[in-house]
Image (cartoon, rainbow, N blue to C red):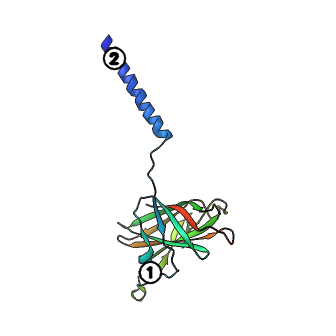
């Protein structure tokens, strides 16, 4: 009789411990920390040699918090990644914010190396699919912007060939003319 009691007590205790662990996990989930990267602002020249120098290389399926400092009245920057296989890739942007809380908006563009031999030193713009339409510049905005036109979260889909390098170009401007923000930040993940 005593043996059965100890087994039942052990099972109950073990069940309570598992329930407690599950409760703690649900209340405080383990989340992967986003890696912080700061992009160098560029002067708008889209030669491959220039962009290769300033584009930050990112890894697929890793979350990044990107910071871009202002040049003139805009924030520009590049990241790049190489496709490990031929497939469609999803680029997701979220949580756009500024250093002073002002509203901002902008877009992302995809550039790849030109296929024509005489233009190989330049990058060309490629279309992406975002929000059900084909576009060369999916839009993205912060809180306080017309979010039907500039959504808070944007996911764009692109098709790349194996070993093709994609250059993602970001450009943001203040929502209110003369905005005083010095930098913008946003989350980026490519899957």
Residue at 45%, 80% in the rendered image? 123
Residue tagged by mark 2?
Answer: 6
Residue at 51%, 77% in the rendered image? 42
- Above or below residue 46? Residue 90 is above
Q: Tags 2 and 1 in contact by the CB under 8 Å rule?
A: no
Q: Secondary structure at mark 2?
A: helix
- Locate residue 3 relative to residue 80 in the image: left or right: left
Q: Secondary structure at mark 1?
A: helix
For the residue pair 69 and 153, the one nearer the viewer reads as 69
| Residue 50, numbered label | 1
Marks 2 and 1, how far apart at CA: 73 Å
For the residue pair 146 and 78, the one nearer the viewer reads as 78
Percent position (x, y) of residue 5? Answer: 35, 15
Residue at 45%, 53% in the rendered image? 33
Percent position (x, y) of residue 46? Answer: 48, 81
Observer able to see residue 172: yes
Percent position (x, y) of residue 53? Answer: 42, 77
- Of circles 2 and 1, the one toward us is 1
- Which quadrant is home to the C terminus? bottom left
Percent position (x, y) of residue 184? Answer: 57, 65
């Amino acid at each position: 009789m005593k043996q059965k009691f100890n087994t039942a007590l052990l099972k109950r205790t073990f069940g309570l411990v598992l329930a407690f662990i599950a409760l703690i996990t649900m209340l405080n989930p383990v989340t992967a920390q986003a890696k912080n990267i700061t992009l160098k602002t560029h002067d708008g020249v889209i030669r491959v040699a220039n962009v290769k120098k300033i584009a930050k290389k990112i890894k697929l399926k890793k979350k990044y918090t990107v910071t871009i400092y202002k040049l003139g009245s805009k924030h520009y920057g590049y990241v790049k990644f190489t496709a490990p296989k031929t497939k469609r890739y999803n680029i997701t942007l979220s949580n756009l914010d500024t250093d002073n809380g002002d509203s901002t908006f902008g877009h992302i563009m995809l550039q790849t190396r030109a296929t024509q031999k005489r233009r190989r030193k330049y990058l060309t713009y490629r279309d992406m699919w975002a929000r059900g339409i084909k576009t060369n510049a999916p839009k993205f905005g912060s809180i306080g912007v017309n979010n039907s036109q500039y959504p808070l979260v944007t996911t764009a889909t692109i098709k790349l060939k194996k070993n093709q390098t994609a250059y993602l170009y970001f450009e943001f401007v203040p929502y209110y003319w003369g905005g005083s923000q010095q930098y913008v930040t946003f989350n980026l993940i490519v899957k």
